[in-house]
Image (cartoon, rainbow, N blue to C red):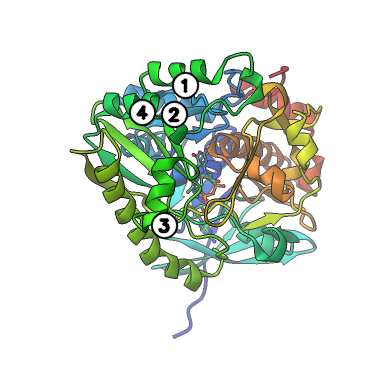
Amino acid sequence: MAQRLRQEDYDVVVIGGGAAGVAAAVSAARNGSRTLLVEAGPMIGGEMISGLPIDGCLNTRGEWVVGGVARELFDECDKMGGYVGAFYDWRTIWVVCVDPEVMKLAVMNVVMRAGIKLLLYTFAEDVVVQDGKVTGVVLLNKNQRTLVTGKVFVDCSGDGDLAHLAGAPHEMGGEEGALQPVSLVFRMMGVDTERLMSFVAEKPENVAVAENPYYDNISREEQLRRLVEQGYPKVFFVAKGPLISAGIASGELYPTALMGIGPVSMKRREIYCNTTRIANVDATDTEKLTQTLPELMEQVWICSRFLAKRVPGFEDAQFSGIAPRIGIRETRRILGDYVLNFDDVMNAKKRDDGVAKGAHHVDIHGSGRYQLRQPIKDGGSYDIPLGCLIPRNVKNVLLAGRCLSATREAHGSARVMGTCMAMGQAVGTAAALASSANQLEDIRTVQVGALRERLKEQGAVIDGTH
Ligand SMILES: Cc1cc2nc3c(=O)[nH]c(=O)nc-3n(C[C@H](O)[C@H](O)[C@H](O)COP(=O)(O)OP(=O)(O)OC[C@H]3O[C@@H](n4cnc5c(N)ncnc54)[C@H](O)[C@@H]3O)c2cc1C
C-alpha cells in the first residue's frame, strides 16, 4: 500500500560516512548546525577502517598539512592504543598507520561527541530541486522513505550521487573507459616483521624505494637502510622484481603492479596488504561491482598463500581479516566552479581561496602491472580552492572526497584519505556558516576569508609554505 513520506528537517545533511563525510559532519555540528550524517552501509569510517594507511596528512618533507578533525581522530585512536605512527615510507610519501579495529571505535566516539544524528543502513536515492536549490533528499531504509529537508546538503558519497541527482555535470575515468582498479585489502597477523625487513635489506631488487627526487641527496642504499632501520614492516614489493614476477610467471600470483604492505598493529605483529585488483569496472553499476567480489576474494586468498609460502617472515603468519567492503578508487568526478588540474598539483600551487591541502603524489593505478606515480615539486603541498567543492548548477550543495572537481591526474593525488578529511572539514564548516544565514541564496555567498579563519581556529592547516 502506498505510504506518505515521513519528513525530517536539519540544517546540514551529509551523505556518506567515509573519511570525507565523517570530517564534514563533525565540522558542521561543531560549528552549530543540526547535522544529519547518512550512510548506506553498516559502519562509518570508510577506508580508514580497512587497514590502509592514511595518506596526504604530511607532505614528503614531513610537515603536517592536514590538521583539525583528522588529528582529533588520530589522538582518539592513540588514547585507545590504536595509533601506530606517522613515518616516511622511503619510497615517496609520509603515511599515518592506524589499527583499523580501534579506528572503528575512535570514529564513532568523535562523531557521537560532536552531537551528530547518525543514520546507518540508509541510502540517499533521490533529491527534490527547486530553482537550482535542493530542498530535500529522499532516503530509503527499513522505515520506508523519508524526505529530509535542509539548508545545505553535502555530498560525501564518493560517487557524487547527490550532486549528480541534483543536476551537476561530471566526468568519469580516462580514455576508452579506463578506471582505476577496485581492490580488496586484507590483513595477516603473527608476522615476523624483523625477518621480513631483513629480507627487504638482503633483496632490495624486489622493493620500491628512493623514488622521490626531494631525497635525491640520499643514496638509494641509504634510503633502504633507513627504511629497514625505522622498524616498521612497510614495504612495496614491485611487479618487476624477481619475487613478484616469478610468482606471476608461474601462475602462483595474478598480474599486479605492486604488493603494498604496512603495519596495522605492532603488538599483534599484524600487517595490511594492498595488492588485489580488477581494473576498468564502473563501480556505480552495482551489479558489475558485486560481480568483482568473488574474484577479489580469490585474489586475497592466493596472495595470502603466496606470502606464507614465498616471503620470509610470513611462515607462521595467519590470515586475520578482510576489509569491510570493496575499495573503490575512482568513479564520478563532479564538475565544480573550479577544476583542480595537474599543474596545480605538480607545482604545489598556493591560493588565497585555498580551504584544504593535498600532498600525495599523482597516483593512478591501471590494469595488471600498470601504475603512474609522479611526485609533487620539492616535496610540497598544493591548495584546494573552495570552487573544487561547489558543484555547478546547484546553489546549496557542497561536496568533498574522491568525487571532487578535478582532472583525472589531479584526482589521482587528491583522492587519498588525509586530503578527503581536509576537504570534509572545509565543506562542513562552510555549510555551517552558510546555514546560519537567515535566508541562504547561494552557497557562493560564503566569505572564503571568514571560512579560512574559522578553519584555522579549529586546527586546519591553511596557510604556510608547506
Ligand atoms: C584499494 C585502495 C587503496 C587505497 N589506498 C589508499 C591509501 O593507502 N591511503 C589513502 O589515504 N587512500 C587510499 N585510497 C584512497 C582512499 O581510500 C579513498 O579515495 C577515500 O577513502 C575516499 O573517501 P570518501 O569519503 O571520499 O569516499 P568513500 O570512502 O567511498 O565514502 C563514501 C561513503 O558514502 C556512502 N554512500 C555512497 N553512496 C551513498 C548514498 N547514495 N547514500 C548513502 N550513502 C552513500 C558509502 O557507503 C561510503 O561509506 C585507496 C583506495 C582504495 C580503493
Callout 2: helix, strand or loop? helix
Numbered tag placed on residue 233 in the rendering: 4
Spatial CA span between label 2 and label 1: 8 Å
Nearer the camera: disc 3 or disc 4: 3
Above or below: residue 45 compared with residue 397: above
Spatial CA span between label 4 and label 2: 14 Å
Dot 3 or dot 4: first in sequence order is: 4
Callout 1: helix, strand or loop? helix
Name the quadrant containing residue 423. top right
Answer whether labels 1 and 3 touch (C-beta < 8 Å).
no
Answer whether labels 1 and 4 touch (C-beta < 8 Å).
no
Answer whether labels 2 and 1 touch (C-beta < 8 Å).
yes
Picture quarter with the C terminus: top right
Q: Which residue is mark 3?
A: 254
Residue 286 horizontal side relative to residue 99, left or right? right
Answer whether labels 3 and 2 touch (C-beta < 8 Å).
no
